Amino acid sequence: MNEEQASKAHISDILKTKFCGLSLNSPIVLLSGCVGFGEEYTRIDGFSNADVGAICLKGTTLEPRLGNAPHRVTETPSGMINAIGLQNPGTDVVINDIMPNLDKTETRFIINISGSSVEEYGEITKRFDDTDIDAIEINISCPNVKEGGVAFGNDPDMSYRVVDICRKNTTKPIITKLSPNQTDIAFSAQRCIDAGTDGLAVINTLMGMAIDTKTKKPIIGNNQGGLSGPAIKPIALLKVHQVYQVSKHHNVPIIGQGGIMTANDAIEFIIAGASTVGIGTALFYDPLICHKINEGIAQYLIDNKLDNIDKLIGTLEVNTFNSPCNPK
């Protein structure tokens, strides 16, 4: 083995990690909705699924969905807004036609599920429990059709019910994707942990709007959509830090996500408490970004004499001071 090969092998080894009991090649997770069903970016020269630890497949519902009317995506300052509307072919097609074609030797695959009722979440989970999918990510940002339309993820008790029914219907690792559009994300995280989630994805997109000044109408056909990209990174970092204060006591790992564009961004999330980092919008700017982020994380670990990211997770040292408004 020559020096270059030895260096690549060292980088490969230092990036390996575990998440919810799964062995991953890298702490990078490709986020749901950004890579289709795992095959879209493999058409790009130089891209390899083997460069990432796991891929979250496109959000899947029990029955097929056509999604929202266009426009579905629009660029905004330092990010983008999307409102795809969960277009997907339905659970049975994903299980029978899509999953058999996934190359499971390259990376791990996580199915992202969405429902309009607690019962639907339970049924989808049960069907995927009989497959070789590695884990199940629950999107609890969906509206609860049966009980007034409020998003499951904005009500901690409803979040508990969704996670609880999913937990009862699978032995696979469950990752709950938390919405930032709620009052107390740490309390919601605790409720999801109480219900049996194995991991947490922090955060989902924030709600936003863009307006066409010529027509005086929203650009997005759905009027509003999920804001992602660098614009939300400071919010996402804070939410990861807040959730980590709860999750660390239960050994529940976090996928930190929201505006990660560079290795330094990823490292910030790990320091804040994330065990893995989610890449999504960055792929639209640079489809080969994952390889660069991997190299940057590995170099940071080497420079700081760390042999894996575990020793970096949650090492944030918050400032302490005496405030005149809150004297000690």
Image (cartoon, helix red, strand yellow):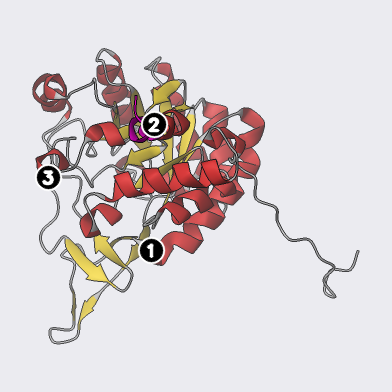
Q: Secondary structure at mark 3?
A: loop
Residue ranking furthest to the right: 328
Q: Is residue 45 visible?
A: yes
Point out the stretch of residues depicted in magenta: 1-9
Task: Tell me, for residue 230, which label it has, or none.
Answer: 1
Residue for badge 3: 44
Q: Secondary structure at mark 2?
A: helix
Q: Is residue 174 left or right of residue 95?
A: right
Q: Is residue 191 left or right of residue 258?
A: right
Name the amino acid type tagged 3: Ile
Residue drawn at x 37%, y 29% as measured from the top left: 25
Which tag is nearer the camera, tag 3 or tag 1?
A: 3
Near mark 1 (Cα within 10 A), the count class, few <14, some 14-19 or many ≥20, is many
Q: Nearer the viewer, residue 159 or 100?
A: 100
Give the quarter of the image for residue 189.
top right
Q: Calculate the distance from the C-alpha at mark 2 to the C-alpha at mark 3.
A: 22 Å
Is residue 4 located in the magenta-colored stretch of the structure?
yes
Q: Nearer the viewer, residue 317 or 299?
A: 299
